[in-house]
Image (spheres, rainbow, N blue to C red):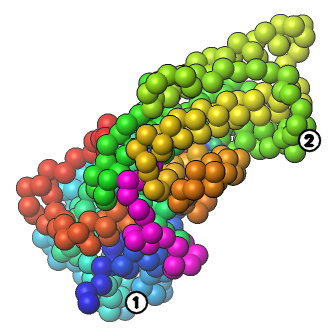
Amino acid sequence: MTKRTILAIETSCDETAFSVLQDGKTLSHKVHSQADLHAEFGGVFPTLAKREHDKNFTPLLALTLKNAFAISTLPDSNNHNLDEEKIKKVESFLSREDDLATDLIAYFQSISDQDFLKIKTGLDAIAVTYGPGLEPALWVGISGAKALATIFDLPLFPINHMEGHIASVLASTTKNDKGTIQSIMFPTIALLISGGHTELVLINSWHEYSVIGHTVDDAVGEAYDKVARLLGLPYPGGPQISKLAEKWRSEYGDRKNEFTLPRPMIHSRDYNFSFSGLKTAVLYTVRDKIKLQNDEPLNRDQMESLSAEFEQAVVDTLLHKTKQAIEKYVAETLIIGGGVISNQYIRENFTRLANELGINLLIPEKDLATDNATMIGLVANLQMVDGKAGLLPDSDEFVNLMANGNLSL
Ligand code: KG4
Ligand code: ZN
């Protein structure tokens, strides 16, 4: 049986990530987050993200390949020489990327012929996120993927980032027997909750998606990030707010919260969400409180209670809408994907809901909830299993593949 070994690349936001998967199992998984650099801007700054992807692309790729194929990092006297024609193509694909062509060519010329051959014969395909996301950031991955597909003469699979979040539940980076394609029973409802998206998706079979509900304004992760900013906490705000909320729950679990926030659109008869009103309600609450205490900012206790009420409002809304969708479509499986499902309280609440409804719940491991390349490789693997072919280097579709910041499912 032929193996499907895929090198996957993800650069849609502020994580540079590579993975190598073989028949859907992770051989190597590397993520480099730029979150600390963006923290001072209170969000992801696109041109900085692009520059950082350019800078980190080659070292992280080298580490990923070393891990997957036992590539030696020692300089070798029998270095590999890329042919002139390939070098020209690589330079042309990477003409808009700072130093990436130079770095990438230098790397492949620094490894031995034998190691180069190990990678070339070891890989069957390249997969890359082409949207949705920040276009300057997406372009780094796409151009880099075209360069790699050209160097190794491999087909290229352009992958939708949101489909990646759905497929993330199939993987394990620590053990090789987590989810299987078979453990998903259709119809499936997927709830995607990230920094850029909040969507309820009906899945009748792999690759057949219909978005039945979405946020009409801010995404959940975005709301966490904005509320954190209001409270003077750094980006990304999700982990910060959830830590404060957790503290309040562990101390006052059963007590009524001193703050009350709305549950926007909870009674609307559709599957849509709205989180911008919730964020504004937090803004007014903070303002009123500060006024009331003669310009004194919120103290730690108050920040904890407000975070807990905010998180509860998010949980109540997500649970309610998801439950409605499960019941309406008589779903057999619930998948939750996206950075926000790293949140322990949200995980616990959905586990409870799934038990109550007797539905099969699939949630990614925590390091696969936030952006990574394993989930991108998993989608390519599913496509290969279905017999789909990738784009061949030099074909028009390959050359013309572009970033699509607003790509939908
Ligand atoms: O999926 P992701 O890594 O990137 C996007 O595609 O957007 O999601 C990032 C989002 C950020 O908004 C971040 O604040 C949120 O996920 N997040 C969390 C938690 N960890 C990350 N939100 C709530 N609780 C968390 N523990
Ligand atoms: Zn994401």
Between discs 1 and 2, the one toward the N terminus: 1
| Circle number at residue 76 | 1
Q: Is 79 in front, or is 163?
A: 163
- Secondary structure under badge 2? helix
Q: Is 261 in front, or is 231?
A: 261
Vertical side of 295 occupied by 305: above or below: below
Q: In x, y percent, where is residue 394?
A: 10, 63
Q: Which residue: 80% across, 43% down?
A: 246
- Marks 1 and 2 sit apart, C-alpha to C-alpha, by 59 Å
- Quadrant the N terminus occupies: bottom left
Q: In x, y percent, where is residue 157?
A: 25, 62
Q: In x, y percent, where is residue 104?
A: 34, 67
Query: Predominant secondary structure in magenta?
Result: loop
182 within the magenta span: yes
- For label 2, being within 8 Å of ligand 1 is answered no
| Circle number at residue 251 | 2
Vertical side of 387 occupied by 338: above or below: above
The local crowd at label 2, few if under 14, some if 14 to 19, many if 20 or more residues have their Cα within 10 Å, is few
For the question of whether residue 251 can be seen, the reply is: yes
Q: In x, y percent, where is residue 164?
A: 40, 56
- Secondary structure under badge 1? loop
Q: Nearer the viewer, mark 1 or mark 2?
A: 2
- Quadrant the C terminus occupies: top left
Q: For the residue marked with disc 2, what is the amino acid?
A: Glu
Q: Which residue: 30% across, 79% down?
A: 4
Q: Which residue: 44% across, 51% down?
A: 331
- Write down the region rendered in magenta: 173-190
